Each structure stands twice: as structure tokens, then as C-alpha cells.
């Protein structure tokens, strides 16, 4: 190919010394007209100082016909024999003109946007791809400063900073940005390489630039980042609504301009079964969000239910089990937008421009829970295949978290219902103490714990106060709590002392823990058992790994009971020690579980001191004191269940109790009967004398005949009339059916028939047989 280059030689005085045919063709002047004349006479405009310094840049020459000719000039120094500059060879190319060299053609026709900037960040060259992105021809940008050609954005400022860095350091750099361009209708991701162009002296005289459109890779990275963020940000709580809100926060505005989460009705039902109707689907709105303030696009309010027709994208996604994409113009999309607009005409304007919809089912463990819907309005890109895959993956992860929250809520509800059924609802009537209680299940992710309490009436107007805590949470812990609660009531009915009762309970827990079924393989529990006698006003208590109770005395002082707590239940092989103390009438005993005072962020000693101070605070009633204690001691967000039982002690005065020592002589039975009758008359209970005489006669006779001294008779007038006969023998009585010709054996059977209930208990000196009969009506 023959090509005439536009070239000229200019000496150091600025005079033209040579002129090529190509130069004549560009500006019209012949060699005779320009040789030996100053080169500046050819200029139509002054040359920029940076163009002179860099020996390259945009220059406007004067054509022979008077017009202006913009050219890109490049200068190259000419050296004489001594190495000194004697002039310059200057070549000229029309901007945007056809390239004649292979290298020039490769630059001009490259698919990547390429450009050249001088050291002051002015345009020197742009290829066709760069011009298409900028939206103007090359000649419109040549010589222009880069910031003047683009909007003032952080990405463009960063671009300019990297251009300057290449000039300053002489090293290539890579710059990644996400921004738009004048001729592009949306933002793109660009990976730009910038490298220095060096002259013969090794100095930077220009910067070469090549940009790669990495939008696809950028969005692939964004999708991967979204998945990673979904794993960390969705499901932070075991709450269905909050989990749905976290999904919305993840999707809007990064993935969709509007998004909603709707769940099937059965998800919220305690006994609901997975079900998707054959035709229209009823869904409940759980959460939604929008780029537009106030979420005006939402036709359904949060908490409301809506019916989705069979052709709608959400219904199709639910039934098909796969994500569904619909674009503007498609019938399903048109019907969807029209139906939404009809539902909420006031907000229909906010849906103008909606062009793409995606509905993905929320499926977990093979069960469909609901659907998440995303709509794009201001985002110009339609949902594509990659978005479809991403939506299904994010929806699947969110569905597992929602299902976990649903299962946790159901298990928590079941455990709480089971625990409420096992805890005493109305405490049994008794005169020994006045009680008030509180049970607060925690919101811990571990579930409901095994805290429990009980008030058990005992013989002789005594009462047992129990509080315990099973290790662990959830239904297994609650079930174990029920077993222990039943076991304590059974052992209390035997009327064992507190330390012996805990020993038996410890054996039971050990047996449960060794159960081969593994149901309670790691079972452990703590328990405090106390017995209060209103006659002697003495409290006998023992603990198995449980915090000591606090006592508020009548003088207003409060302190923990000094006692030795044995090992937790289930350890086995270690003894339990009982503590006994006398309580004045009106004392308040506070029994509680460790959730009240123990927390990883609190000091136990400080918490117990707060408990004692709270007990000392004035309160109108025992119930009000319960609330005062919880408010003062309990942290704002307790991590464990809390059980609190307050018992105000009462005392039976001498006018309610009568005691006689009985000489072990059968002749003294009649005297005992008479003494009991006289006491009943004094109490105004003459109507009960007949039955009481028979009971006293039989019990005293049995004690004299089969027991051992000392023998004692005691009558207690409480809510019932109690008759007790104690002796020094530890042999327990039992009922038997006498034969027709037997002379004895009918005494206890007669007592059982005549009284409300009867029984026996072991004492430190033998046993006591007791019988209760209701008081006559006033």
C-alpha cells in the first residue's frame, strides 16, 4: 500500500526546512510556499503549552483556502553528529481519519474502549469504541481536559486520580469502577488498565488507557456477595416476622425496587398442616419493603390476608415449586399490575414503570411455606436467568430460617402449654402461709426451661414449699420437670423430712439419667424443699444444688438463709443436709430459681443483695412485692426462665391447739375421750364430738396396745379439725379387713370411714397417726 505521510521538518529557529506531499494534501500549501518560512504562520490557533512540552497533541492549522484544519501532531527530535538537537520531524494525522498502519488499525478498531491522554489529562486519541461510549466523535474531545467531558462523580474523580498517578510514578495501574457514561443508559462496571507511554529519553509523555466492560462479572460477584450476606443476615432470630423482614432488607434496593413476603395461613396455626389449595391461594402478608418511602406500591397491608388467583405469578410459583419471571407486556404481568392498581388506586402511580417481576417459592425440607415477590421499577435491567437462580437460592435459605422459626415457635408454645399444665394454677387452700408467685419464661433461643414450683399441704396444718430447675430447655426439659414435680408430691405425701426426700429424688434422677432410651441421658436438676409448721413456727429445709432462699423478717431486715446446699440431683452418692430455723409470724420467705440472680454479665453477690433490698421495700400486698422483686432484680432481657415463690408465714395460737400426754394404760382412754370432748365444747364444735370421741378412742387404744411410750394426743383447730396421736414406735399402721368373728382389727377402718382423710408420718421419736374431719358449718 502506497501512502504519503503528512510530515514536515522544522529547525531550531522554527523555520520549515522540508514539506511532504501528504502535508500539501492536508493543508493545500505547496513546498515552495512554506519552506524557509516560520512554521507558526501555518497556525490558525495558538498551540497549547502542554502540546509543545510533550511534542504531541491537537493543533489547528490554517488551510490555503482559509479554513481551519484540526490535526493531531507528533514531534520527534533530530540529532546532529555531536548528539545535539538540530530540529524536529513533525507528522500530522487528521483526527478520526482512516488508519493506514496495522498498529493504528488495531487501536482504532479494537472492541475495547482505548484512549491516549497527555500528561495533563487532556485527550490525545480515542478509538471508535471509546467514541461510541462517549457519544461524540473523536475531534470533539481531542485536546479537552478529562473532567470537562464527564459528570462530577466519585468514580470519575478516582479515574482522574489514577491518570495522575501514572504520570507521577511512571508505573501502570488498574482501576475498577461502577459508573455510567454519556452514551450509556445504565451504569456499567469497568476494569481499566492505565500505562505510561515513554519517549526516547524514558520520560512519560502520555498515558495509554484500555477499559474492559466487566458488568457481567461485577453482577456475578454481587450475586455471590448477596448469597454470603444472606447466610449471615437472615435468621438472626427465631421469629418468623423478623426473618421475613431481614429477607426484605437484603433484597431492597440491591436486588429489587419493591419486595414482599407472603406466607400460607397454615404456617401461623398451632396444628396447621402443609396445604396448597388447588385453585386460588390465600396468603398472609408478613413483610414488604420499597425504595419509595412509605411503600406505596403495596396493595396488601402487613398482617392482612389476600387471595391470589391461579394465573398470578405467585400462585404459579407456589404450585410449580420454581421461581417465575414475568416481563412488561406479557399477559400475566399485565394482569398482575392491573389487579394491583385496582386494589390501591391511590398508589397506582408508583407502579408506573414497573417492567419486571419475579416470584420465588419459600420451600424448606420439601414443604412450601409461602412466596417472595420482587418488582423492578427504576432499575432498568429486567430479571434474567441468573436472577432466577439467585432468587431460588436466597428464597431457599430464607425458607429454612422461617421454618426453623416456625418450628421453634410451635415447640415453645407446646412446651409452655405443657409447663403451664404442670405448674399449680390455683394453689391449694392451707392456713400455714400466704403465697404469691410468678413464672416468667425467657425468650432465649434455647427454648422454655424446666423451672417449677409447688405448694403442698401436709398433715398437721404444715405446708411444703418447693422450687426446682431442670437443666436444659425445650419439651424434654419440660417433660422431665413434670416427672420431678409428680415425684416430689408423691414423696411429700409420705411426709419425709426434706433431706430424706431429696435423697429419694436424687435416686430417681439417677435412674432417669441411666435410662437406655437416652431421653434424659444428660439429665440434671436442682431443688429446694422446705417444710413449715405453723404450730411450732419452725422451718425445716434442704437444697440440692439450689440457691438459698431469702427471708424478710417482721422488723424489715432481709437476708439469705444460712444453709449448706448439697450436690445437684443426679450426682448420686453424696448426702443432703437439713437446716432448721424458727420464723416469727409474718416473715416472708422468698424461694426462686437461678434465672433471677444469675447471668453471664452480672455478679451473683450483687444480685442477691439487690434481692434482699427489694424484699425490704414497702409493698401493699404479697403480689405487689413479687412485682417489685422482679423489677429490681431481673435484667431487662433475661436469658433463663425465672420462678419466684413468696410465702408469708402464719402461726396457730395456743387457742387453736390442745395437747395431752397419755399414760400407756388402757384405762386412760376414757379420760382422753373426755378431754377431747371438753376441748371441742370450748371451741364451739360440739357437733363434731361424737366422731372425734370414736377417732380418739381408736387411735389412743392402738398407740397403747401396739405402740411405745411416750404417747401424746393433739387436737388442732384449723380449716379442718385434726386429731393426732404420737407414740415412740416407728411401725407404720395399715388397714386390714377383719373377719366376722375377729375381736379387733376394725379400728383404722372405722377411722377411715368416719374422717375426711387420715395417714401417718415418721417423726424423730417414732410416728404420728392423724385424721382430719371437716368443721361443722357456721
Image (cartoon, rainbow, N blue to C red):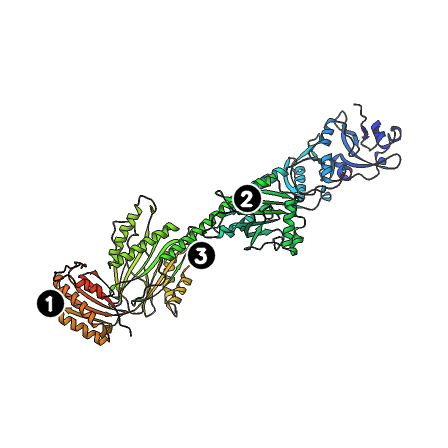
Instruction: Name the disc covering residue 319, or none.
Output: 2
Q: Please determine whether, in this image, residue 24 is positioned above or below residue 701.
A: above
In the rendering, at what x and y percent does residue 10 appear? 81, 31
In terms of sequence position, does the residue under pointer 1 or pointer 3 come before the other? 3
Is residue 646 left or right of 461 when viewed as pictured? right
Q: Residue at 20%, 68% (x, y): give it.
A: 714
**Marks 2 and 3, Cα distance to the nearest angstrom?**
42 Å
Where does label 1 land, which residue?
666
Tell which tag, 1 or 2, sits nearer the viewer.
Answer: 2
Q: Dot 2 surroundings within 10 Å: few (below 14), some, or many (20 or more)?
A: some
For the residues bearing labels 1 and 3, Cβ distance under 8 angstroms: no
Q: Nearer the viewer, residue 690 or 344?
A: 690
In the rendering, at what x and y percent does residue 719 appear? 28, 69
**Marks 1 and 2, Cα distance to the nearest angstrom?**
90 Å
Q: Nearer the viewer, residue 539 or 454?
A: 454
Q: Please determine whether, in this image, residue 133 is positioned above or below residue 672.
A: above
Q: Dot 3 surroundings within 10 Å: few (below 14), some, or many (20 or more)?
A: few
Secondary element type, mark 2: helix
> Could you tell me if residue 745 is visible in this image?
yes
Is residue 763 left or right of 17 when viewed as pictured? left
Q: Quadrant of the C terminus?
A: bottom left
Q: Residue at 29%, 50% (x, y): give it.
A: 509
In the rendering, at what x and y percent does residue 739 appear? 14, 59
The region drawn magenta spans 139-144
Tell which tag, 1 or 3, sits nearer the viewer.
Answer: 1
Please identify the quarter of the rendering in which residue 217 is found. top right
Amino acid at each position: 500500500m502506497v501512502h504519503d505521510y503528512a510530515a514536515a521538518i522544522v529547525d531550531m529557529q522554527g523555520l520549515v526546512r522540508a514539506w511532504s506531499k501528504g502535508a500539501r494534501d492536508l493543508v493545500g500549501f505547496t513546498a515552495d510556499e512554506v519552506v524557509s518560512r516560520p512554521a507558526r504562520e501555518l497556525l490558525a490557533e495558538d498551540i497549547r503549552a502542554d502540546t509543545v512540552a510533550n511534542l504531541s497533541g491537537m493543533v489547528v492549522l490554517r488551510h490555503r483556502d482559509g479554513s481551519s484544519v484540526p490535526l493531531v501532531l507528533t514531534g520527534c527530535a533530530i540529532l546532529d553528529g555531536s548528539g545535539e538537537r538540530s530540529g524536529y520531524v513533525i507528522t500530522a494525522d487528521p483526527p478520526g481519519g482512516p488508519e493506514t498502519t496495522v498498529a493504528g488499525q488495531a487501536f482504532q478498531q479494537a472492541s475495547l474502549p482505548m484512549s491516549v491522554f497527555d500528561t495533563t489529562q487532556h485527550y490525545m486519541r480515542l478509538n471508535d469504541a471509546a467514541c461510541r461510549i462517549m457519544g461524540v466523535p473523536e475531534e470533539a474531545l481531542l485536546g479537552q481536559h478529562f473532567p470537562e467531558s464527564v459528570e462530577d462523580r466519585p468514580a470519575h474523580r478516582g479515574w482522574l486520580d489514577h491518570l495522575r498517578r501514572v504520570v507521577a510514578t511512571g508505573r501502570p495501574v488498574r482501576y475498577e469502577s461502577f459508573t455510567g457514561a454519556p452514551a450509556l443508559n445504565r451504569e456499567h462496571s469497568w476494569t481499566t488498565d492505565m500505562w505510561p507511554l515513554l519517549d526516547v529519553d524514558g520520560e512519560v509523555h502520555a498515558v495509554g488507557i484500555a477499559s474492559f466492560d466487566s458488568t457481567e462479572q461485577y453482577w456475578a460477584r454481587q450475586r455471590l456477595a448477596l448469597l454470603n450476606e444472606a447466610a449471615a443476615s437472615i435468621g438472626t432470630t427465631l421469629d418468623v416476622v423478623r426473618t421475613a423482614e431481614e429477607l426484605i432488607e437484603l433484597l431492597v434496593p440491591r436486588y429489587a425496587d419493591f419486595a414482599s413476603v407472603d406466607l400460607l395461613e397454615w404456617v401461623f396455626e398451632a396444628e396447621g398442616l402443609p396445604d396448597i389449595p388447588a385453585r386460588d391461594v390465600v396468603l398472609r402478608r408478613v413483610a414488604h419493603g420499597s425504595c419509595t418511602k412509605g411503600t406505596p406500591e403495596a396493595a396488601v397491608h402487613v398482617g392482612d390476608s389476600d387471595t391470589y388467583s391461579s394465573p398470578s405469578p405467585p400462585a404459579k410459583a407456589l404450585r410449580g415449586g420454581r421461581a417465575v419471571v414475568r416481563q412488561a407486556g406479557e399477559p400475566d404481568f399485565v394482569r398482575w399490575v392491573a389487579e394491583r392498581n385496582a386494589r390501591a388506586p391511590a398508589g397506582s402511580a408508583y407502579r408506573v414503570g414497573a417492567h419486571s417481576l419475579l416470584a420465588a417459592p419459600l420451600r424448606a425440607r420439601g414443604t412450601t411455606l409461602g412466596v417472595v415477590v420482587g418488582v423492578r421499577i427504576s432499575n432498568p435491567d429486567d430479571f434474567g436467568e441468573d436472577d432466577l437462580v439467585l432468587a431460588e437460592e436466597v428464597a431457599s435459605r430464607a425458607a429454612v430460617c422461617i421454618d426453623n422459626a416456625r418450628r421453634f415457635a410451635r415447640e415453645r408454645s407446646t412446651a409452655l402449654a405443657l409447663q403451664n399444665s404442670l405448674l399449680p394454677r390455683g394453689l391449694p387452700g392451707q392456713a400455714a402461709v400466704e403465697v404469691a408467685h410468678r413464672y416468667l419464661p425467657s425468650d432465649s433461643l434455647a427454648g422454655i426451661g424446666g423451672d417449677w414450683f409447688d405448694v403442698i399441704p401436709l398433715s398437721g396444718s404444715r405446708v411444703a414449699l418447693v422450687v426446682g430447675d431442670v437443666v436444659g430447655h425445650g419439651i424434654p426439659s419440660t417433660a422431665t420437670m413434670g416427672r420431678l414435680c409428680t415425684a416430689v408430691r408423691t414423696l411429700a405425701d409420705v411426709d419425709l423430712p426434706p433431706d430424706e426426700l431429696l435423697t429419694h429424688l436424687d435416686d430417681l434422677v439417677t435412674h432417669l439419667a441411666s435410662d437406655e432410651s437416652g431421653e434424659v441421658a444428660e439429665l440434671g436438676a436442682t431443688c429446694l424443699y422446705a417444710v413449715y409448721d405453723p404450730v411450732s413456727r419452725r422451718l425445716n429445709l434442704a437444697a440440692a444444688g439450689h440457691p438459698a432462699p431469702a427471708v424478710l423478717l417482721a422488723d424489715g431486715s432481709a437476708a439469705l438463709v444460712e444453709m449448706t446446699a448439697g450436690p445437684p440431683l443426679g450426682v448420686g452418692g453424696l448426702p443432703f443436709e437439713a437446716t432448721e430455723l424458727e420464723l416469727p409470724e409474718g416473715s416472708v420467705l422468698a424461694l426462686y430459681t437461678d434465672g433471677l440472680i444469675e447471668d453471664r454479665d452480672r455478679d451473683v453477690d450483687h444480685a442477691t443483695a439487690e434481692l434482699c433490698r427489694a424484699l425490704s421495700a414497702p409493698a401493699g400486698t404479697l403480689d405487689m412485692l413479687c412485682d417489685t422483686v422482679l423489677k429490681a432484680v431481673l435484667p431487662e432481657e433475661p436469658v433463663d426462665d425465672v420462678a419466684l415463690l413468696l410465702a408469708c408465714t402464719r402461726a396457730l395460737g395456743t387457742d387453736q391447739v390442745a395437747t395431752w400426754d397419755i399414760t400407756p394404760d388402757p384405762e386412760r382412754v376414757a379420760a382422753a375421750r373426755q378431754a377431747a370432748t371438753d376441748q371441742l365444747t370450748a371451741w364451739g364444735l360440739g357437733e363434731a364430738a361424737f366422731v372425734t370421741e370414736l377417732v380418739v378412742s381408736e387411735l389412743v387404744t392402738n398407740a397403747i396396745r401396739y405402740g411405745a411410750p411416750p404417747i401424746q394426743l393433739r387436737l388442732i383447730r384449723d380449716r379442718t379439725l385434726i386429731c393426732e396421736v404420737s407414740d415412740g414406735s416407728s411401725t407404720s399402721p395399715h388397714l386390714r379387713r377383719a373377719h366376722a368373728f375377729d375381736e379387733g382389727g376394725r379400728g383404722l377402718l372405722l377411722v377411715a370411714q368416719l374422717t375426711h382423710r387420715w395417714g401417718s408420718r415418721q417423726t424423730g421419736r417414732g410416728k404420728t397417726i392423724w385424721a382430719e374431719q371437716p368443721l361443722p358449718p357456721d
